[in-house]
Image (cartoon, grey):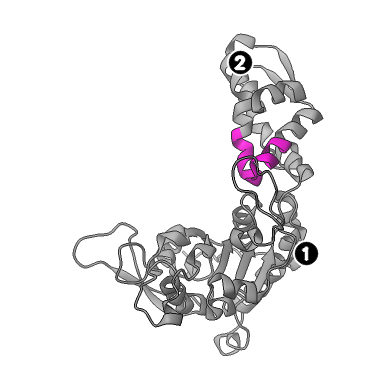
Amino acid sequence: MPRARPQKRTLLTPRSIYAFLDQHVVGQERAKRVLAVAAYGHVRRCGLPPERKGQIRKSNVLLIGPTGSGKTHLVRMLSQVLDVPLSIADATEYTEAGYYGKDVEQMVAELLHRANHSVAEAQRGIIFLDEIDKLARRTQSYKTGGGTRDIGGEGVQQSLLKVLEGRELLVPASLSPQPGRQDVVQVDTSDILFVAAGTFADLFERERPSSRIGFGDKEQVSHSRELSTEDLLGYGMLSELLGRLPVRVQLAPLSEDDLCQILAGPNDALLSEYQTLLALDQVQADFSDGALREIAQAALRQGLGARSLRGLCEQVCHDLLFEAPERRGQRIVIDEQYVRARVG
């Protein structure tokens, strides 16, 4: 019986990648365009023969933006449109080789696990390395000549260089540590797209004209200024690492309109989950525009972006979910007064 031919993937363009991201990610227009171009170039590079592939360098990406601005969500949607496996790693989990913690090879092993142990699939996947700013050099031994070890900062940055550039690595075949000899698999990282992300909040804190000490300081930190390479070097990032992250994009904090669209927009609306839960008990819940604004303003006050919306929705809908079985058949309108009484 002849083998079935593998299904040919649809040839994507930067515009089609952007259109998919635009359907699922609110705001961040520039970030979506930059990611679309970088992803398209990466796919085209991966399709070249080996003798030509070396003429084009990898388009690894560095995302800079505040908490809750959509960095992780952007990369998740990018892996969906490219139809490749995705591994999400936290930079704070990794330490320099020989110390307690994860080695950088472990992030490639996790991608291999996400690809169902298919080396070919893993080698065209995406690794998202969050909290990259936490790897900034934290000691001054490079200036003073001292021997202080920075096992979770500069040492990990040095270890990442070979992985980001593209190297054949021996990675463990199993994620769980096993006593005795552990099987390893050879994986080439040359075609793996790395997307690093960080808040670099301290750099933006320095831009504030004044800082009051004590409680009641409600001044918002501005993220409008574009960070330069010199800013990142001064922050403690290695120039060699920044050179391997050539595509950089800075995300803006989400506005009140953006947060309202996440709550009740046409795609993947957050409030629709709660409306579906209530509908299971035959309770119809409608949210007014004023209620959406109140929730969005509460999220802005917390300063956590879209990350705080689910917690606020839980506060608003808690009583309704508790009383839903007794209010079967009712239609409930949630207005701004109802929300204000529950989120303060």
Horizontal relation, residue 204 to residue 333: left or right: left
Q: Give the SS element for disc 2.
A: helix
> In front: mark 2 or mark 1?
2
- Return the residue nearer the eye: 201 or 249: 201
Q: Give the SS element for disc 1.
A: helix
Q: Residue at x 71, y 19 (%)?
A: 284
- Return the residue nearer the eye: 176 or 290: 290
Amino acid residing under circle 2: Ala
Horizontal relation, residue 190 to residue 159: left or right: right
| Residue 211 drawn at (x, y percent) | 65, 53
Name which quarter of the figure residue 57 lies in: bottom right
Q: How many marks?
A: 2
Name which quarter of the figure residue 83 lies in: bottom right
Q: Residue at x 60, y 58 (%)?
A: 201
**Quadrant where the C terminus lies?**
top right
| Residue 141 drawn at (x, y percent) | 41, 77
Q: Looking at the image, which residue sits at the far front? A: 213
* Residue 232 to residue 340: above or below: below
Q: Residue 158, labelled with which disc?
A: none
Report if residue 305 lies within the magenta region: yes
The magenta stretch is 296-311
What secondary structure do most residues of the magenta stretch adopt? helix
At label 1, counting other C-alpha atoms closer than 10 Å, the crowd grade (few under 14, some 14-19, many 20 or more) is few
Q: Looking at the image, which residue sits at the far left? A: 180
Mark 2 and mark 1: Cα distance apart in space = 45 Å
Q: Residue 324, labelled with which disc?
A: 2
